[in-house]
Image (tube, grey):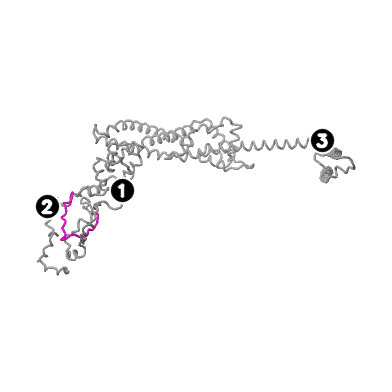
Amino acid sequence: MGGPPGPPPPPGMGGPPPPPGMGGPPGPPGAPGMGMMGKKPKKPSPKPRQKMKQFNWTKVPDIKIDKTIWTNLKDDHIKLDLDELDDLFAAIEKKAPAPGDAKPEKEKVVQLLDTKRSNNTSIMISRFKPPQGLDVNHYIKKAIVDFDVEVMTVENIQILQGYVPTPEEIALLTEYTGEVDKLGIPERFFLEMMSIPRMDQKLESYLTERTFETRCSSCENGIAAIHETCQAFVKSPKWKKLLEIILAIGNYMNGGGARGGAYGFTIESLLKLGDIRANSGDTMMNYIAKLSDSQFTETRDLEADFPKLEQSTKESIPMIQADMATLKKGLSIIQKELSESGPGDSFTRKFEAFYNQGSKRVATIEERFEQMKNSFKELLNQYGEAEKPDSQETLSSLHSFVTALDRAKKENVRKKIAAEKAAIAEQKRLEAEKKRAEKKGPGGPATPTPSDKGLVDDVFSQMMEGRAFGKRGGGNDRQMAQAAADEALMMFNKLKKT
């Protein structure tokens, strides 16, 4: 057991010699220019006097030490009570088991990564199912290098992009000088991936190839929907005639006021037509729909002029532009990888033709995109609207109006059918009343009088009580039945005359 450290030496006498293995005081400063530039020299590691318990810290890689707090910390200046450390933290050796009781000692796995990164990497690796007997890390590496399309699905590529070795992980594994077999599976995975040149660049290239067709089609369909819809609203004769009708109605209704005498109105104003309610209960939209179907038949089937209007409302110019930027960025990465792979490389064989064809297709998409933007700009100019970065709001307003007009037309048809049915029912009722009046004779009431009703009620009452058939004396049952039938016939004839 060692006691506490002694008092400091007198000034100028210097300190006691360092304990064995702890190193001496720092030497004189190095020559100018040596400083902290570049990779730091390997730091001496003092060897303890006996086996100690381990402090499982995570070392900051030497290449990251510069410009950190660690640069100015000098742990070799710290005087430690080694006797006390040995006494408190020496590794206690286990007693040797008795003969026959010894169990094979489980091989200790060396973990260099932090626990969270290690666990997540293990979970990620478990997604891949290599053939029997093939190491999973080698299987993943081969799939990346050879671009195995069955393994390199979009989902797997995106997951692997989160497990490209970082510079810190590369430095940590490079400094490891022990046996590779003793490393954990996550550490061995990163060692395997470190041997793939430009792994992140390859994965991004693969992702571009796997998503290229879907992204291109999305851009092309969106551009076509917006372009064709904008062109239709500029050129459609039906649409122009309908706007003339609405303008005439609006100027008449607003005549003499500040809103009267208008040469035109904003697209957004179309949506307010449904708010104007007629005294009959219908709206202005119902009235315009009626004019379209009756007086101005050239405006019928308006929605047929805009077959892609609904789709265009789901598209966004900024989103299409973002997808195009993603396509261009992906092709740029492929071009860079091609330039660094060489003519005989497997990547070049698989991606050179794809890059050439893809570049031409993206260039065509860019041309159509500019045409679409010009079409939207023309639409805004034609209707006196301010410039907007996106078409979605404007086309959604137009879609809402066209849909509301179509709905109003269908509502008008339903009301017309209901009115016709009501008119037919009323006609039938009047005809029935006329027939009843004719049966009563000239001047007779068209409906049964109270006396008629009393007669009918009396006849039925007699029939229910049996008095209508009277009481027959003598004769057999057949005679009684015949008499009852005759009596009933007479009663029904009375009813018929009423």
Tell me which corner region of the image, top left, top right, bottom left or bottom right, holds residue 463. Answer: top right
**Which mark, residue 439?**
3
Q: Residue at x 63, y 38 (%)?
A: 415
**Which mark, residue 31?**
2
What segment carries the magenta color?
Answer: 36-58
| Residue 60 in the image, given as x and y percentages of width and height | 23, 53
Cα separation between marks 2 and 3:
135 Å
Which tag, 3 or 1, sits closer to the chain's start?
A: 1
Which tag, 2 or 1, sits closer to the chain's start?
A: 2
Report the side of 466 relative to 426 (left or right): right
Q: Secondary structure at mark 2?
A: loop
In depth, the one of 160 and 267 nearer the eye is 160
In depth, the one of 468 and 282 nearer the eye is 468
| Residue 230 in the image, given as x and y percentages of width and height | 46, 34
Q: Is residue 265 visible?
A: yes
Q: Secondary structure at mark 1?
A: helix
| CA neighbours of label 1 inside 10 A, class few (<14), some (14 to 19), many (20+) | some
| Residue 195 in the image, given as x and y percentages of width and height | 23, 42
Q: Which residue does the numbered mark 1 point to in the structure image? A: 122
Q: Residue at x 14, y 51 (%)?
A: 34
